[in-house]
Image: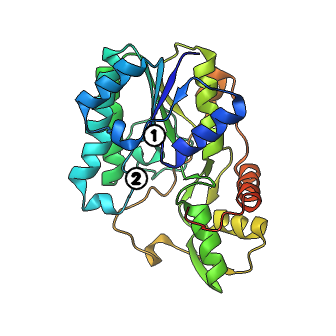
Amino acid sequence: MGKTLIIGAGGQLGQCLKTVAERRGISDIVFPAEADANILDQTGLKSLLKKEKPAFVINCAAYTAVDKAEDELELAKAVNETGAANLALACASNQSTLIHLSTDFVFEGNVVKLLLESDDAQPINVYGQTKLDGEKAVVALLKEYFILRTSWLYSEYAKNFVKTMLKLGAERDELNIIADQIGTPTYAIDLANAIFDIIESESKEYGVYHYSNEGVTSWFDFAKAIFDISGTSVMANPIPGSAYPTRAIRPAFSVMDKSKIKNTFNIDIPYWRDSLIKCINEINNNSFNEIHR
């Protein structure tokens, strides 16, 4: 399948890609340090790709602090748009196929319907807008690319909602969780497997694809499942988003249709609760002493 290079290797998805690569026996893969793969350094990226000559580049690097992005527009824009453009140019110069990660937050999320790749993207916050602009940069600068939009990403690595809930559930007697924002959790290990499935397919069906786990839930029900599966005794109260205002507005409904990726690459997508059980078992089996590792 050729060499694969990971940008943003130290983040949550990067760590999951490393775990999955080891499990699948994929050895021709490079996880450069952040200093050697700075997405804002166009010259450095071109030199890195020229040296490694990867067939595929997976871009896991992103500015993902949704609320902070409202006040750090230039930084979010630099990483999510300019960085994506830099990487697309480097891939074009080295004949590498780019797999670029994006988000369900490119959608407004004001209509209860499964979101298709062809639906109009109308972000309602800075993070979503910069990610959409990054998508547009990739499309404009590169012919051989796969853009994968995902949602509510979690795993046993890095900071995420599951590990935060486990930590808070162990510390508190009661928690208020938003119940009127609907989407689908995605286990980053499942996403990593899907990415390698795409690479191994040798498909040339380039374009935008949606990937999350199957099913639909709210943040409240997601949290309840975390507590139930982990045996955490904490009172969880459902609250409206209006009771917990945030700097950035979130989509109310951002459930994506996955028919395109399933049919194109013959991918089986696990149900979100089944994957959550696997993740929590992995956390317990590995005895993660620090929830926010």
The x, y position of residue 131, in whole percent, is: 36, 42
- State the residue in front, 109 or 111: 109
Q: Is residue 183 above or below residue 201?
A: below
| Residue 72 lies in quadrant | bottom left
Amino acid type shown at disc 1: Cys
For the question of whether residue 172 can be seen, the reply is yes
Identify the residue position indicated by label 1 in the image. Answer: 60
User: Are there few (<14), some (14-19), or many (20+) residues within 10 Å of tag 2?
Assistant: some
Q: Residue at x 55, y 53 (%)?
A: 152
Residue extending farthest to the left is 74
Amino acid type shown at disc 2: Thr
Say the numbered circle drawn on residue 278.
Answer: none
Horizontal arrangement in the rendering, residue 65 relative to residue 292 (left or right):
left
| Tag 2 near tag 1, CB within 8 Å | no
The answer for how far apart the CA atoms under marks 2 and 1 are is 11 Å
Quarter occupied by the N terminus: top right
- State the residue in front, 110 or 257: 257
For the question of whether residue 237 can be seen, the reply is no
- State the residue in front, 199 or 110: 199
The x, y position of residue 242, in whole percent, is: 44, 74
Identify the residue position indicated by label 2 in the image. Answer: 64
| Residue 84 lies in quadrant | top left
Quarter occupied by the C terminus: bottom right
Horizontal arrangement in the rendering, residue 287 relative to residue 7 (left or right):
right
